[in-house]
Image (cartoon, rainbow, N blue to C red):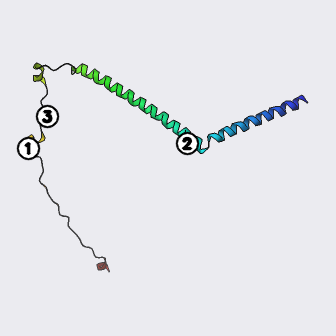
Amino acid sequence: MFRRTFWFTAGAAAGVWATAKVNRKLKQLTPESLAAQAANKAVETGHRLKDFALDVRAGMVQREAELEEALGLDAPVDAADRDHELPAPRRRAALGPTARPHTTYSIPTISYNRNEDH
């Protein structure tokens, strides 16, 4: 008698548990719930991308500072150091005309009359 009661109770509990689990899963798969999950994932991805961009920017600033220090670019420029500066870039006009002569190509035109074939 106790055995039957035990198994009946165990079966009823398993049925209630399975039903509750299926109902929860069905609620997760409604269109509203799926849309909310997608929106949350998009916001989370946006935050991760923003953090990544900020990390990249901080690394760029740090690397620029290291390069400027290594090259001595962060020091003030004195009048004596101006002799060692690179020359200003030349203007394209100072190099002379670079325009090529314009050539036109004539494409031969062939008239084709389909009636000539018959």
Amino acid carrying mark 3 in the image? Pro
Badge 1 amino acid: Gly
Q: For this rendering, which residue is in front, 11 or 111?
A: 11
Q: In the picture, which quadrant includes the C terminus?
A: bottom left
Q: Position of residue 100 (x, y in %)?
A: 12, 51
Residues under labels 3 and 1: Cα distance?
15 Å
| Residue 37 locus on image (x, y percent) | 55, 38
Using the image, determine if residue 66 lies above or below residue 114.
Answer: above
Left or right: residue 44 versus residue 116 is right
Q: Residue at x 77, y 37 (%)?
A: 15
Which residue type does callout 2 highlight? Ala
Left or right: 8 in relation to 72: right
Report the residue at 69% width, 36% height from top: 21
**Alpha-carbon neighbours of circle 1 within 10 Å: few (<14), some, or many (≥20)?**
few
- Residue pictured at 23% horizontal, 70% vertical: 110
Specify which label sits upstream in the sequence, 3 or 2. 2
Q: Could you say whether the residue bearing mark 2 is in a helix, strand or loop?
A: helix
Q: Secondary structure at mark 1?
A: loop
Q: Which residue is mark 3?
A: 89
Left or right, 4 with reference to 18: right
Instruction: Return the residue at label 2.
Output: 35
Task: Tell me the crowding category of disc 2: few under 14, some 14 to 19, or many 20 or more residues within 10 angstroms, Cα based.
Answer: few
Estimate the x, y position of residue 19 in percent, counting from the top left.
73, 38
Q: What is the spatial separation of the Cα atoms under label 3 and label 2, in whole angstroms? A: 56 Å
Instruction: Check residue 96 in the rendering and tell me which mark sits there, or answer none.
Output: 1
